[in-house]
Amino acid sequence: MRRGGAPTRGALGIALIEVLVTIVILLFGLLGLAGVSSRANLAEMEAYQRIKALQLVQDMADRLNANRKVANCYSNGSTGVTLSASTTTLPACTTGSLQEQTQAAADLAAWKDLISGQAETQSGTKLGAMIGAVGCVTLDDAVDKVYLVAVSWQGLHKTVAPKLADGSTAFSCGSGAYGDETLHRVVSTKVRIGSLS
């Protein structure tokens, strides 16, 4: 230091280096924060899609329970029903009364619309569905009248491919629709139709 308190040239250089090092450290911190924010957005979208799928599964389970006399119409017998945005025809129901058949057809059409995302639109664009949503209703056990209701969609990052409870068989609802099975997501529930006398 010189006599009047003014810093020397060497002291000015060190202060400049300290400022540059501080800026570099701050830059790395901000980049890390941006990465955390990006991952949080991805996790939020995954959670949103899972919630929508759970709502759709419960919706069909409720519809199936409400019209239990023609439950076979919802799964097209043992064939199973698969609905998505690209589904153009619904199975014809031939059992039960005309009112029950009409209700089953209306339920399947409404569920297809929900899967396609027609409930939430903005400027004509469907916003409400998951990515590549597929809904399936299959007769899981004909003796006990157990139906499997499932909704699958495409995830945003890779995880483990979904399998049935035995652990070796791939889950059929939506299988092969997303290119990579590690992007395949699915939620399901079983509905047992009791014999009411």
Image: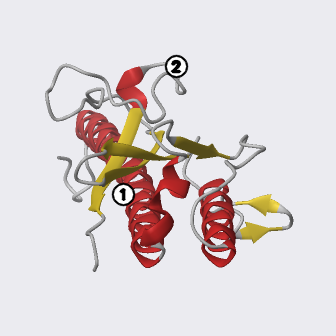
User: Would you say the residues marked 2 and 1 are in contact, meaning their CB atoms lie under 8 Å apart?
Assistant: no
Q: Which residue is mark 2?
A: 179
Q: Residue furthest toward the left?
A: 166
User: Measured from the top left, where is residue 169 in percent x and y?
Assistant: 25, 21
As drawn, is 17 to the left or to the right of 126?
A: left
* SS type, badge 2: loop
Looking at this view, is 33 or 74 the one in front?
74
Q: Within 10 Å of the Cα at label 1, are there few (<14), some (14-19), or many (20+) other Cα atoms?
A: few
Report the residue at 69% width, 71% height from top.
Answer: 102
Looking at this view, is 50 or 110 the one in front?
110
Q: Amino acid at mark 2?
A: Gly
* SS type, badge 1: helix
Q: Which residue is mark 1?
A: 47
Tally of numbered discs: 2
Looking at this view, is 188 or 184 the one in front?
188
As drawn, is 135 to the left or to the right of 84?
A: left
